[in-house]
Amino acid sequence: MRTKILIICFILFGFLGYSQSKEIYTNPDFASLSKDHKILAIIPFKASVMLRPKQIEKMGQEQFDKLQLDQGKSVQSAMQTYFLSKREDKGFAVTFQDVAKTNAILMKNNITNANIESYTSQELAKMLEVDGVISGSLSTDKPMSDGASIALGLVVGFYGATNSGKCTININDGKTGDLLWKYEKTLARSLGSDINTIIDAMMRKSSRKFPYIIPD
């Protein structure tokens, strides 16, 4: 009886370990859903800096909201930088809309960080005239850039870039809205402390499973 219990526990913990380590999802119908894709848009990421209520109060809600908005746009920019820098050696099957154009179109249509989640992937793709939308979220315990961290440190009393948090990257089909690909990574010291460094490290780790890379 004891042996059976140990075997069951071993299987259960093994299953849980596998589930928690599975960071990448690819839609089984990816090939058919994306066969006509030519261009993707990267929208601003939803960013959250996990400060305590008293720290937010000391900083001011307006300044805190701006900090998170700027951090979300920094991730958006870092994604574009990665794709541009790797375009030739990786051989992407799609191109990526310039984020300045993406943000200008969103602004003209009165879409802000506060209301963008009320729009579907289909609505955003149609508005941006793209075949798919890259979105995601970033949560950190401190701002990602040294400049922002120092500025915030003067107000709420801490310095240094983040060492913990989580980043999620999603790609949705523009026609159906279906989730095509998802990558979720818990941030650690080994990934660096700068947004560009972290995105580059994450994408390099997932590059073999990034669905739009043309195989050798």
Image: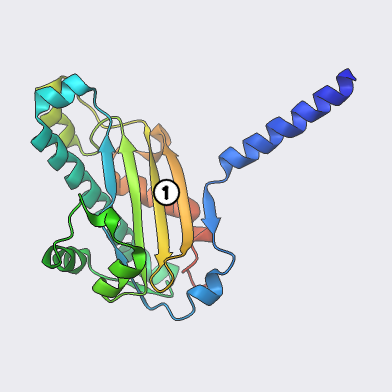
Q: x, y percentage for residue 118?
A: 28, 56
Closer to the camera in the image, 82 or 88: 82
Q: Quadrant of the C terminus?
A: bottom right
Seen at 31% across and 57% down, the residue is 79
Seen at 30% across and 32% down, the residue is 162
Taking the image as shown, residue 88 lies to the left or right of residue 159, namely right
Q: x, y percentage for residue 107?
A: 13, 63
Mark 1 surroundings: few (<14), some (14-19) or many (≥20) residues within 10 A? some
Amino acid type, residue under disc 1 in the picture: Met
Q: Which image quadrant for residue 129?
A: bottom left
Determine which residue is flagged by label 1. 202
Name the colouring of the figure: rainbow
Looking at the image, the residue that sits furthest to the front is 118
Taking the image as shown, residue 202 lies to the left or right of residue 24, namely left
Residue 216, visible in the rendered structure: no
Q: x, y percentage for residue 51?
A: 24, 27
Seen in the picture, residue 101 relative to 141 is either above or below; the reply is below
Closer to the camera in the image, 116 or 150: 116
Q: x, y percentage for residue 109?
A: 15, 67
